[in-house]
Amino acid sequence: MKLPPFGKELQTARKAGQLPDVWIMAGDHSWNRARARKPPRVLCLPPDAEFTEYDWRCVAGLHPTLVAWNWPPDRIDAFARHLVHAGARLVAALAAEHDGVRVVSCRPVFYKPTRARVAA
């Protein structure tokens, strides 16, 4: 699988021992929003792509912030869970809605790995 856009820069930083705060831009205008930040602190899911098309293991051990513009809650949930499954330690998912001019609402939801309980 291929890395998400700007993933190569993140991998290079990780190999150099850096643990950057990473923002993942998804949804409406994700390219423009991603370009407003500098790699390796940003990844982008192109608007016409599915998150399952990319290898997100580059966020393993990190605490990425997922910003998803005008996505339904179930799609945000699936992507955030996918990032946790790829090794993210904590995902802050921001479900943002805008009317084309300004942000109308923004709901944060946090995702982290769960530990299975072992019966005594």
Image (tube, rainbow, N blue to C red):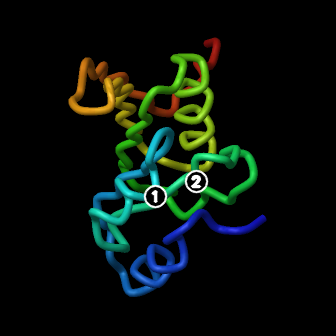
Q: Which residue is painted at 35% across and 65% down in the image?
A: 35
Q: Which residue is mark 2?
A: 46
Crowding at dot 2, Cα within 10 Å, few <14 / some 14-19 / many 20+, comes out as some
Residues under labels 1 and 2: Cα distance? Answer: 6 Å
Q: Give the amino acid at mark 2.
A: Pro
Q: Is residue 19 above or below residue 94?
A: below
Q: Which residue is painted at 59% across and 35% down in the image?
A: 79
Among numbered discs 1 and 2, the one appearing first in the sequence: 1
Classify mark 1: helix, strand or loop: helix
Quarter of the picture holding the C terminus: top right
Q: Position of residue 105 (x, y in %)?
A: 26, 18
8 sits left or right of 52 in the view: left
Q: Which residue is painted at 54% across and 78% down in the image?
A: 8
Give the numbered dot on residue 31: 1
Looking at the image, which is closer to me, 6 or 71? 71
Confirm or deny contact between disc 1 and disc 2 (CB under 8 A). yes
Q: Is residue 33 above or below residue 74?
A: below
Visible in this render: residue 90?
no
Q: Position of residue 16 (x, y in %)?
A: 39, 87
